[in-house]
Image: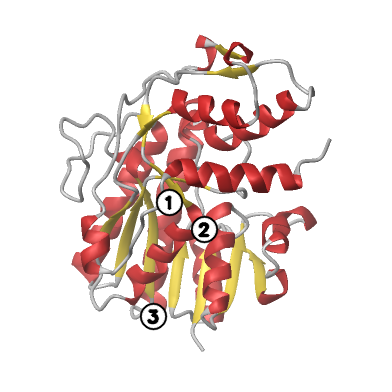
Amino acid sequence: MKTAIITGITGQDGSYLAKLLVSKGYKIIGTTRSYNQASNEKLKYLGIEKEVKIEESDMSDVFSTIKIITKYQPDEIYNLAAQSSVGLSFEQPIGTLQYNITSVLNILEAIRMVNPKIKFYQASSSEMYGKVKKLPITEDTALHPLSPYAISKATAFWTVVNYRESYNLFACNGILFNHESYLRSNNFFVKKIIRESIAISKNKQEILKVGNIDIKRDFGFTPNYVEAMWLLLQHPTAEDITICSGKSIYLRDIIYYVFEKLNIPKSKMMVDEKLFRPVDIEDMFGDNSKAKNVIGWNYDLDFFAVLDIMLAEELKNFKD
């Protein structure tokens, strides 16, 4: 039986990844900086809370990191813990940079000291690319981060590459584009749109306030994307691979689609410039050819089909 440590296990990605690894017979250790009874709600929702052992461990503390890796001697570590909101990173740049960079460095250094044979997955982000001159984005596209979050992820990305090349660690970057599900946190765009639109349809809310919606993003479905994380660590060699749908969609079109499904007039949407980011990217989509050809990951879901899945699940669980 393989053992895996998943940092940030109580989040969307960690919970779906844990479900996948449980189905493959892994022993799962999940870490969180601060545990409380509400922390494992996503694991409970997926019916796997009894299959996962959760430990409090702060990856920004190198001694805590070494301790947990020594204790469990995992075969694989999936680092999904981060301050992951782009918008919040502009409000909290120091905290975002410190945690997102230091935690990765600590895990890699702990692996090097405790057991260099441990395989490591780092959750990288398409936000690292920022201002690109040519689309689609590939693994060779130059990085030009436009937010504190993106800077932290770019630094962590190169730290992984450096440890792989300098110390021969099996360390990989999965460069994920936007990926959504019912378990997404409420402050993220698609989840916010769906929840607030349902509230409007039930006369619980008057208006949907949004920021810049005339930009395009590459969106996918989280349960499929976590499979790519696992496949990356099963490959014979450590790779950095882009995980994306390969096409982008206007944020405005997402809103209009949800409104149409819920019979909400477009007049119920209001653009609020206070919600605009200091810097934003007009269009971004990736090329998933390497993921298909190297690790055998296949993805062909249209994002409107994903929206249908999310809408149905949200309506099923919506509480008046």
Q: What's the mark number on residue 60?
A: none
Q: Is residue 9 above or below residue 317?
A: below
Rendered residue at 59%/73% (across/down)? 29
Of the 4 image quadrants, the one containing the C terminus is: top right
Label 3 vs label 2: CA separation?
Answer: 17 Å
Instruction: State which tag comes first along the sequence, 3 or 2.
Output: 2
Q: Callout 1: helix, strand or loop?
A: helix
Is residue 305 shown left or right of residue 196?
Answer: left
The residue to which callout 1 is attached is 102
Residue 57 visible (yes or no): no
Q: Callout 3: helix, strand or loop?
A: loop
Outermost residue to the bottom: 1
**Disc 3 vs disc 2: Cβ atoms closer than 8 Å?**
no
The residue to which callout 3 is attached is 115
Q: Position of residue 47 (x, y in %)?
A: 70, 68
The residue to which callout 2 is attached is 59
Q: Amino acid at mark 2?
A: Met
**Disc 1 vs disc 2: Cβ atoms closer than 8 Å?**
yes
Q: Is residue 118 above or below residue 125?
A: below
